[in-house]
Image (cartoon, grey):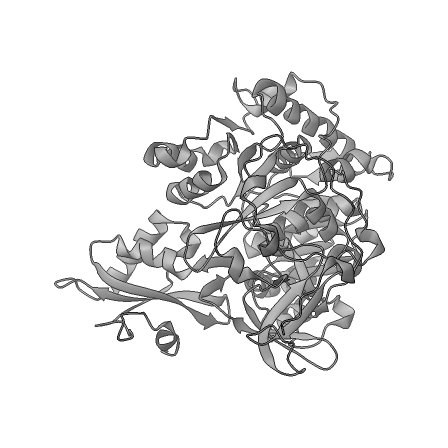
Amino acid sequence: MTHRPSNTAGTPSPPTPPSAQTDRFVHERLPAPGQRPDLRFDLPQLQFPASINLVEELLDKAAQKGFANRPLLRSPRRVLTYDEVRQRVDRIARVLLEDFHLVPGNRVLLRGGNSIGMALAWLAVVKAGLIAVATMPLLRAKELGEIIDKARPVLALCDFALLAELQGAQTQHPAQCTSLQSVVPFNQMNEPGSMAVLAAQKNGDLVACPTAATDIALMAFTSGTTGLPKAAVHSHRDVLAACECWPRHVLKAAPDDIIIGSPPLAFTFGLGGMLVFPMWAGASVYFHDAPYTPQAMAEVIHEVGATICYTAPTFYRQMAPILKTLNAARGMPALRVCVSAGEALPDATRQLWRQASGIELTDGIGATEMFHIFISSAAPEARRGAVGKVVPGYTARVVDEGGQELPRGSVGKLAVVGPTGCNYLADVRQASYVKNGWNYPGDAFLQDADGYFFYQARTDDMIITSGYNVGAPEVEDALLAHPAVQECAVVGKPDEARGMLIKAFVVLKPGCVADAAQVKVLQEHVKASIAPYKYPREVAFVAALPRTETGKLQRFKLKSLP
């Protein structure tokens, strides 16, 4: 019999008050009750009231915690205190409600890199009871069209520099973008119609929408193995519950901390680490003016006095020799915690970083579907080769195909339950992720006798490269659109620098030449079709792809090739 946890095993959630979200689009497309994950609220800190707005809790109540005049958002050009952020957030929220007449539950597409403007926009959307749909900056028109079609946002707030692809989605895929009524740039200071100009005309005092704890705060998109976008839905309570688990018990940030990092705010790893968790701790976040390079991040660590850093193993590995040189010239920085997540952390990278910085990396595994990290250990408790132990508030097990827990030391599927869980928007893949109340992130793990979890591999065909999740079929679709490609298959290949790299096996059409020039042509084609980080770094030309008698592609045979 498969074990199924229930809320009766922990503290049940309080009665749910009426929803404040009058637009019921998302609520009506959540999984049926029997398909949802079981939730546990075992810790005292997880007892939330039935009605709660996460931005009100993190921002409006900052003054009660003594944070009002402390810095929150930093950049090379300005620093905003918690109170200054609150006033700006309130003005933007007023524009959304009063000028665009949005109602709670409406979706708002957010498009921007890590910046003060993007952070203010996200907070305003959620405070107003709207649903934030943040998108990765590198997404192309095709991918944006698919997200808009699924989320049905009525408004988009977009960095001016990223308008082109969004406008391209509207013109190239009009049927998918019918819900989108307005696109507003949020970072043009003197342009009529920009959010900056509209917000400047508003009063900076707004009472937060009285959302129910279970009302929806955000939709986070992640690609599945089919390449079709999946929308993971999270409530106000989900995000606040995440604050009370990994940040409280493992990260332990403090008000004096200055946080930097490379994960995008559109990625829940970045949203938690680079905005929500710092606010929970009363700390501040530094947003760089341009995308980080390893050189730039190492220099920023010294220049701004960063104490906490978030990035992927690939970046730590590239940054290690640079930071070591800077440290020799400038002395050791204030850096004290370095968090690695988004992909498997090679032990060689852990050792290299410790030699360069003197800091033991804090590893962790989380999921967009769970919002953030659920297995991790603080640096003093780190064990070589292990991701860590289950984070307080969660329960994790290594199980067999039937959901039965395996003996310690066995390799099996990871199953997790806690105060957050997977709720996809109108997606049959819900049944694959949630089984008998448990969440199955799709990873194979081993747990030792002391409770440490050791990552083994993905249990599906998802490719995790440099912290990004890439679905193989999506890359295949892009390649197949090229006139030279007859057939193709894409797999992940182990790579020390990136964790995995994307490798394509291509069958060319007759008359096409299989040479280095053709490789370059196909790579550039993919970069122009979908997000550039999804292009195949290796391309092998083959005469045929391995298939079963029924025509099914045998990916495992391709993965075994050098």
13 relative to 410, above or below: above
Regarding residue 283, the answer to whether it shows in the image is no
The residue lying toward the viewer, choosing from 193 and 292, is: 193
In this rendering, position of residue 6 left or right of residue 520 = right
368 relative to 279, above or below: below
Q: Which residue lies furthest to the left in this view?
A: 511
Identify the residue at image location x=43%, y=41%.
Answer: 144
Residue 328, x across and y down, in percent: 69, 63
Residue 142, x across and y down, in percent: 37, 43
Regarding residue 155, the answer to whether it shows in the image is yes
In this rendering, position of residue 64 left or right of residue 172 = right
The residue lying toward the viewer, choosing from 401 and 457, is: 401
Identify the residue at image location x=62%, y=23%.
Answer: 97
170 relative to 433, above or below: above
Residue 546, x across and y down, in percent: 28, 74
Residue 503, x across and y down, in percent: 37, 66
Identify the residue at image location x=57%, y=32%.
Answer: 106
The residue lying toward the viewer, choosing from 104 and 486, is: 104
Q: In which quarter of the image is residue 398?
A: bottom right
Quadrant position of the N terminus in the picture = bottom right
Quadrant position of the C terminus in the picture = bottom left
Identify the residue at image location x=41%, y=45%.
Answer: 143
Total residue callouts: 0
60 relative to 538, above or below: above
The residue lying toward the viewer, choosing from 383 and 405, is: 405
